[in-house]
Each structure stands twice: as C-alpha cells, then as structure tokens.
Image (cartoon, grey):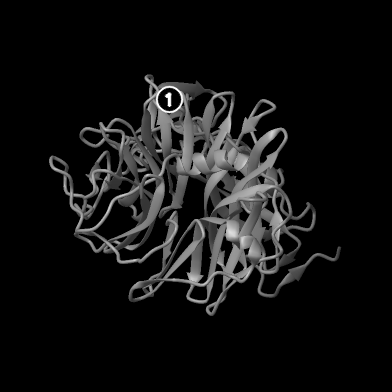
Amino acid sequence: MSRLNRALAATAMAVAAAGGGLLSAAAGATPAGAAPAASCLPSDGTQPPAPPGSHGERLYDVAVVAACDVWAVGSSAAADGKDQLLIEHWTGGGSWTAVTIPGPDAGRSAQLTSVSAVSATDVWAAGEYTDGGHATPLILHWDGSTWAPQAIGTGDTTYAVTALPSGEAWAVGGGTILHRDGGGWAPATLPSDPDLAHLFLFGVTATSASNAWAVGTITSTETPVILRWDGTSWTRDRTVPDGSASLTGISAVSATDAWAVGNTFSNRGEAPLTLHWDGTSWKTIASPDPGTGDLANDALRDVTAISASNAWAAGFYTAPDGRSLLLHWDGMNWAQVPTPHPGTFGNLLGVAAGPASTIWTVGVTLDSTSVERSIAWGFGPVPNVIGDTISAATSALTAAGLTVSSTQNTTTNCTPGPTSQVVSTDPAAGQQVPFGQAVTLTVCGAVVINPTVTVPDVTGETDASARSDITSAGLTVGTVTLRVDCTIPRGTVISQSPAGGTTAPFGSSVSLTEATRSGRAVHQITPHFCTQ
C-alpha cells in the first residue's frame, strides 16, 4: 500500500453507502431526536453504546449544538460485513443514543464521515455509499425530528460538509465540490488546473458566503492542496508550502485566520502537519510529533479553530502502538494534551468546540478482541477551587463533569484556617481533561481548632512588610489612615488596631496608621508639608 493510500485508509477506514427515503431509528433503538433536557448533566465519560447487532463501529466526526446537544457520525459493521450508517446523539450525563440506519440496498455499504450543526433543528451529515468499489455521495439533514437524505445528483463522494446560518453549505470529497445556496445542492466548478485531475478533497470550512476553503491532496504527486472560494469562484492557493503531504482538516476563525492539518510523507514515515493562514499566505507551524520508530505513521485528521489563541487538532501517533493525539494551540505554540487510552489502539478522527471552553473528540479504538469500537470524549477545564472547602470543591468539580479522587493529599505548608481548604489540585486549575476524570485535592492540614490568632506587632514596619506579616497570621489588612510625620520614612506603620500581642478572630482585620510626608493632619486647619 502506498504512503498516500495508507493516509487515505487511515482517514476513511472504510468506504460507505446507503440511500433514499426518510431515515428513522432502527427497531429497538431510542429515537435519535430526543430533545436535550432544559437543564442537563455534564458528561460522565460514558462512551456511546454499540448499536443492536453491531460487529464493530467507528465515529468520524462530531458537532456541538449546545452544552448538552452533541452529534457524532460514523458507521457500524453488520453481520454480513457491510457497513451501516451510524449516528450518535448525546443529550447530557451518560445519555448517548445510537441510531443505526440500514441502507435500502442490502448489497451496498454506507458511512457518514462529517457532520456540521447550525442549530438544534439544522444539522447536516455527509458521507457516501458504495457498491463494488463505486462510491456515490450521500448528504443527510436533521430538521429537529427526522434525518432525511438530500437530492445531490452525482459526484465522487462527500467526505466533509460545512453549513452556515444563512442556509448556505458546502460539501466536498474526491474531486467533487457541492454547493447549497439555501435551496438545493448543485456541483461547483473546480479551478482550471490540469493537476487537479487527480485531486482528492478531504475537508471544507466556511466563515461567510464569500469565504470558504477546501483541503486535500493531488494523489499522483502527494502534493497538498488548498482551494479558496471568494463568493464567485474557487481558485487554488499557491502559497501552500511545497512538500510531500496530505491535508485532511481545515477550520477558520475569520478570513484572515485559519488552520489546516494533515501529515507529511518522508522516507522516515509520516508526521503531523499544521499550516496557518494569516490573511496573506499559508505557513508551516511546528507541532509536537510524539511518535516513535523510524517508520512512524503519525497524522492529524481534524482541527477546530475557536480564536486566535485557541485551536484544537486531533489525530494519532505510533508509540509503538497507535495512540490518540490531541493538540492545543494557545496563540504561541502547539502542545500535546493527554488523552485516555482504553484499548490497544486509538485514533481521533474528529474534533469540535463546545461552550464554556469544552471540546469533543471522536474516533475509533480496538477492544481486547481487536474489534473496532467507537470513542467519544468530551474535555473541559479543571475549575479553580483553590481556597474552597472540600465540600465546595467537590460540588464545583462535579458540576464540571469531573470527580474527586479517593486519594487526598495534606500539607502543612499553608496558612492555617478554621476549616480544611484546598491549596492545589492535580490536574491543575485550567488544564483540559476528559469528562469523568478524577481530580486529586491537596488540602491544608494546619486547621485552627480555636479560630483565634495572635495579632503580630507591625509598628515601625513598612507597609509591604506589615501587610505580609498580617496576612501570614491569618488576618486581613483593614483601614489604612495616613498621618503627617516628618521624622520617619513615608509608609512606616505608626500604630495599629488591635495592638500587637493581642488575640483576634481568624480572618478579622487589622487597621493601620501610617506616616506620610504631606497632607492635612487631623488637628490642622491648613495642610502641612515636610521641608525635606
């Protein structure tokens, strides 16, 4: 198998098919369109269930409508080896709904490889069905109650779809570009370029009716290709860096900020590739390649761009077994984010952004019997619970879809208080982790049984030193009054209340009187100024 064919196989994992008629849930399955609850529970990490009678399944793409409204698409294998359409719907907690939809022609296979959500009543899915190696494009639409196939004519295939709130949409695959302008689907004209006779498109994105991109590869030369739509026609972007590579995913923040991902080919194997568009040209941006071995098969398959300082890319790497690869862009660098490794193999094929800094990824793993099983992981940031009680921290972590580890660390290197308070978490606050992950708390063991403390004597100290001593004792700084005193440095503490050496409730305030060099003292009618 050629390097490019291996890349195509890793992206597609199988070819697909199914056809006409309204699509509904298979017998015995819960209806796919169950509306999300008004208030839903965060994900608990539960994986999508296998459809009835499935002999293996995989998910290729994911789209997020709202906090508890997530769609994922792919395929499941029937007993006869034919693939069937697979749609999974998550509506909170562990409530994944699997919908298998047999094609009307039992002699053909089907798969869905892309999904794009505009709203709860406007979701698009794209894929293909095949018969004896011949592929036919397939596009489905969800209107809030039913998935229905769309009339799209002919074409190579449809690997990716993107939709806009205006009703405009694009679908690409192979050498086909389909356009929907709010009415029906129709083929678009490719750029006039003889090299594009061997074009294979994998991804598409759009930010407006006059700005869209499609990415892929010229199969005959292993040349990466990016096409640009300007509202009138598609053209080939010639600023794409030279090299042997394939591009499989693209996402844009705006017309001047976009990312494309895929993999490079070399004699040493394949490596992840990230390209950035800055409004003028595409440039290669370095990204982690954790794969090992001289013939590593590492690649990125999808990307979602949220802002100039927030983007995510998903794929896989060899280590030496296949493992899921998730990267995050923070505006300066790409960094690897740890992912679960539940089986003997992992491959992330789709990634999408959700609300409140959450993301969703989908793909495929192998179970202990080497049967393909779909994976769907939501990720969210660890909330900042520093200073919270154990009870409050537990509530905050649970609300974020995380759990509290049964292992709890204690430290005395902390400010004593009347209750045990959290001083750190592992993973740290802000770190992106899978829903359902346990967070280990480190709490302050220096608990004050009698919540009173000795007030430190800070007279004669500088303002900064006094504040440090007061807070270190478990107290706070209260009112600071200024008094003109030309004999001592500005900011020196003249007096305090309560006095040093007395006791005060933990957390109460200490008021200070400090020296100043100019101003009106309490007994003066006119301002006084020090001569020096």
In the depicted structure, whether residue 55 falls above or below residue 263: above
Taking the spot 56% from the left edge, 54% from the top edge, the residue there is: 310
202 to the left or right of 262:
left
Q: Which residue is mark 1?
A: 343
237 to the left or right of 325:
right
Callout 1: 10 Å neighbours few (<14), some, many (20+)?
A: some
Residue 491 placement (x, y as % from top left): 71, 53
Residue 442 placement (x, y as % from top left): 48, 27
In the depicted structure, whether residue 161 falls above or below residue 437: below
Residue 63 visible here: no
Taking the spot 38% from the left edge, 24% from the top edge, the residue there is: 367
Residue 27 placement (x, y as % from top left): 13, 42
SS at mark 1 in the image: loop
What is the residue that sits farthest to the bottom in this orientation? Answer: 232
365 to the left or right of 106:
right
Q: How many marks?
A: 1
What is the residue that sits farthest to the right in this orientation? Answer: 532
* Circle 1: residue type: Gly
351 to the left or right of 248:
left
**Image quarter in which the C terminus is found:** bottom right
Taking the spot 16% from the left edge, 42% from the top edge, the residue there is: 29
**Image quarter in which the N terminus is found:** top right
Question: Considering depth in this image, is 314 or 334 the residue closer to the camera?
Answer: 314
Residue 43 placement (x, y as % from top left): 33, 41
In the depicted structure, whether residue 278 falls above or below residue 261: below
Residue 143 location, quadrant: bottom left
Taking the spot 54% from the left edge, 72% from the top edge, the residue there is: 211
